[in-house]
Amino acid sequence: MEKSSLPLPNEAPYYAGAKPARRSRKAAWALVPLAVTAYLFGPSIFRSVAPVSVGGTDLDPWASKSYCAQPDAIFPSEGDDALKKQYEYISSADFWNATVKRISGAVQVKSESFDDLGEIGKDPRWDVFYNFHKYLEATFPLLHEKLKVEKVNTHGLLYTWQGTDEKLKPTLLMAHQDTVPVPPETISAWTYPPWSGAYDGKHVWGRGASDCKNQLIAVMETVELLLEAKFNPKRTIVLSFGMDEECSGRQGAGHLAKFLYNRYGQDGLAVIVDEGSGFEEAWGTLFAKPGTGEKGYTDVHITVRMPGGHSSVPSDHTSIGVVSELITLIEAHQYRTHLEEINPYYTQLHCGAENSPDFPKTLKKLLAKRASGHEAHDSSAINTCKAKPDRLALEAAKQGKDIQYLMQTSQAVDVIIGGIKVNALPERVTVTVNHRINVGETPQIVWDRLTDLAGAVAKKHGLALHAFDGKEEPSSINLAASATTLLVAPVTPADGDPFAIIAGTTRALYGKEVIVAPGIMTGNTDTRYYWNLTKHIFRYGPGYDPEDDKGLAGVHTINEKVSIRNHVNAVRWFTLFVRNMDEVEI
Ligand SMILES: *[C@@H]1O[C@H](CO)[C@@H](O)[C@H](O)[C@H]1NC(C)=O
Ligand SMILES: *[C@@H]1O[C@H](CO)[C@@H](O)[C@H](O)[C@H]1NC(C)=O
Ligand SMILES: [Zn+2]
């Protein structure tokens, strides 16, 4: 589809021909079981027309079942004049100009977070968040007057808009206040200075503009506008903003999640929307990809200790040589590419097969085989030599490394420290290997494999091995896992509610040309601390600008910027979403 053929969202006001959320939703989801029933039990003529030849085999799993059912657009009920006006106002030039100011202002309040931050209250670098709160207070007066404001662990921000129906679980909207730092030596490479918040007619530029002060401001604008329109929610709306997402989130989200858990309990929230993936064109189709999964994470520190001494009488292998041998061995053993059916990318492939004109034929054939059970995936032997190659995953991986690593544990040797003097043998060398763990695997699989490889090298060189036992001794290889280790996130269900509300709201705003497919994140967000609060976590940037270049441009690097059209659409999406959530009983 041509980008320009996408209807600009402001061409259709939400209440034109709108149906209340509940009704349209039922209609969409009711069709699926009906179609399946008809296929299984209907007259044989129904069945004989269904399967078509896919690449030479008579397999067409999509004839009987959709793996990527798209709900109809979901609009909230019409509401009163104030709500109608409020929604129209979001598309006005007044709002555009006002929002430029607000985002620009937010970018101008520096709020970097650093990996080596000390304690809150002692390390003065935390104090920037006082300034950021002051800015938010001044910018969103009504929200600060009407909502309960709580500060968790000094700088974590929690806002609660109490709904009238205690039985409905809250909607939680998240973002983070902090940004990655700007390395001073890169400042001169920015087109506009990183804290200028410069506006060029389309974008606001600066650190944090799209990761993710835009999302934080969009959420607050949504609430402020709904308050102005005297919206009276049945379902409680909670906003939760951490301040160290870019360096593990322990002080912010870590504390906020515990606080919320004490208040709402296990599965106490209906849904969470945090920053995450957005829109992407693939195979000739525009997809929205709310992240329903996140890969796992573990850093492994490898330390090789060997006797020191003078360089003039070395052993054949120094600790640097030994560690090099181990690194070579690690890189010679890449993890297996394999796609579990629970992996959101599996559903994404089905979304492509069902909807995209340019979906590759070979891939479609392999996908059909898998879906029909003709080529069951062998997940029992995930990383052993005995495992059968996953032909579907290997074919899909041909699209590029970024796709491959949605289906494979990655390993990257990123840090090496050792050797200080040219005439002294290195006594201690440390290497850190970063891993992002594939859906269906665990950190333990990574640790076991490194234990095997390091064991072989240790044996060859007569060294002791200490694998994840917290011990060290002279002449040894030691393995230790980082405290940042994280399991693969539980995958959010992508059928039924609330996924259907997320998808239906997206299609209400952007039209039914947009296919909503579950996404998988290779990075981690603050939601890593929130798993117990709901099974329905979405990492989603709901703003889209058909004329913008890649949405992620500049994130974590120079020239970060956000398209204002993208941002305005995000505010419209959050407004529709909050109201849609208010009209369903989940
Ligand atoms: C919005 O701002 C631009 C300048 O950036 C100005 O030309 C325009 O008149 C403003 N529009 C409104 C409605 O205030
Ligand atoms: C969820 O709860 C379990 C059991 O209380 C706990 O062990 C686990 O750490 C919690 N997970 C998160 C992400 O908080
Ligand atoms: Zn972020």
Image (tube, rainbow, N blue to C red):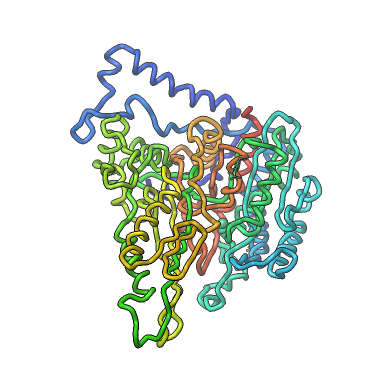
- At x 53%, y 47%, the residue is 540
Q: Is residue 378 above or below residue 51?
A: below
Residue 586: quadrant of the picture? top right
In this view, the residue in front, 412 or 568, is 412
- At x 38%, y 40%, the residue is 340
In this view, the residue in front, 272 or 228, is 272
Q: Position of residue 302 (x, y in %)?
A: 44, 64
As drawn, is 175 to the left or to the right of 444?
right
Q: Quadrant of ligand 3?
A: bottom right
Q: Position of residue 489 (x, y in %)?
A: 51, 44
In this view, the residue in front, 168 or 334, is 334
As drawn, is 80 to the left or to the right of 502?
right
* Residue 279 appears in the figure: no
- At x 74%, y 41%, the residue is 161
Q: Is residue 49 above or below residue 218?
A: above
* Residue 260 appears in the figure: yes
Q: Position of residue 38 (x, y in %)?
A: 37, 16
